Image (cartoon, rainbow, N blue to C red):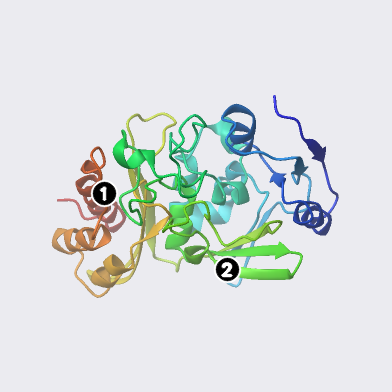
Amino acid sequence: MPTFDYVRPDDVAGAVALVSGDPRASYLAGGTTHLDLLLKDRVIETDRVVDIGRLPLRGVSSDDGVLHVGALTTMEELAADPVVIERLPVVREALLLSASTQLRNMATIGGNILQRTRCRYFRDATVAACNKRAPGSGCAAVTGPARMHAILGADEHCIAVHASDLCVSLVALDADVHIQGTGGRRTVPLTGFHIRPGDRPDIENVLGHGEIITEVDVPLLPVGTRSGYLKVRDRASYEFALTSAAAALRVEDGVVAEARLALGGVGTVPWRAREAEEILTGAPVDDGTFRAAAEAAVRDPFTVPGTEFKVELAKRTVVRILQTVSGVRS
């Protein structure tokens, strides 16, 4: 059993100071991922755990067309918010399909954004070749069984998939992440928060050591926009996505006036499909348009034996969610 100091600060500044001043310190919120990595999988080490669970970073409010979500708000609390239910079905559906009720009552929004990959090689400390754990060691997933891995944003350095359902819906909506560190506060678009692996898979996001997510802002969809989240998985009960898609469409006179689309289960980061959005915008609402968008959304995939099936499955997932939110079924 690893040993470490446990600290519970009273305010955000105190928490930041505790972690920033110790390179081997880490934050703990809901603990649904961090404790597994620390105590069960033993793939991360820390000398000090800073419990931020009681900091005043919880709650949901809205004004001027933006939903403000405290980083310590639980997934269940956000899913139950009346504004989310009425104006952001895509977010609610992503949350409800993410995990069991028990986990949603523990897991926080900030923690979900920061969750680590479910790559079996990353989470097995006996596997030496993992560039995410040990830069320069290689990627065992490229040559080993890799059915659950990424095909977009991947390369020979790393094919670990980003597991969050919620982030897929949030990147489609252009959510912003508010961050606090020793240097003050800053705001980063969620679309630029996560970093594709490249030759440094160990660097997963733009946070500096000790920085903390304090709030997430989510623009509300215009009235009349229809949205939804589709998750394809091996079983209907709690399971991670093979492929998923978040979509929002505003249709006027049979033509797409505005489109938002993001993919999950296939990207090393939550994947915004901007080329597909460009194809959809101004095009007629029909299967031909949807298929063209799907082709653009899954362009230039990087596959290994075991992940090739995801190319076609992702395209079909895109077509189906667009059919669903538009009301057009072939």
Q: Is residue 257 left or right of residue 316?
A: right
Residues under labels 2 and 1: Cα distance? 28 Å
In the figure, 313 relative to 294: above or below?
above
Kind of residue at badge 1: Ala
Look at mark 2 in the image and give the residue it sits on.
188
Return the residue nearer the eye: 180 or 2.
Answer: 2
**What numbered label is drawn on residue 314?**
1
Return the residue nearer the eye: 295 or 258.
Answer: 295
Kind of residue at badge 2: Val
Q: Is residue 313 left or right of residue 142?
A: left
Give how far across and how far down residue 18 sits, in percent. Answer: 81, 52
- Using a 10 Å C-alpha cutoff, classify the residue at mark 1 as few (fewer than 14 neighbours), some (14 to 19) or many (20 or more): many
Q: Is residue 187 left or right of residue 171?
A: right
Q: Residue at x 77, y 41 (%)?
A: 48
Give how far across and how far down residue 269 sits, in percent. Answer: 43, 54
Badge 2 or badge 1: first in the primary sequence: 2
Q: Residue at x 37, y 38 (%)?
A: 140
Observer able to see residue 208 = yes
**What numbered label is drawn on residue 15?**
none
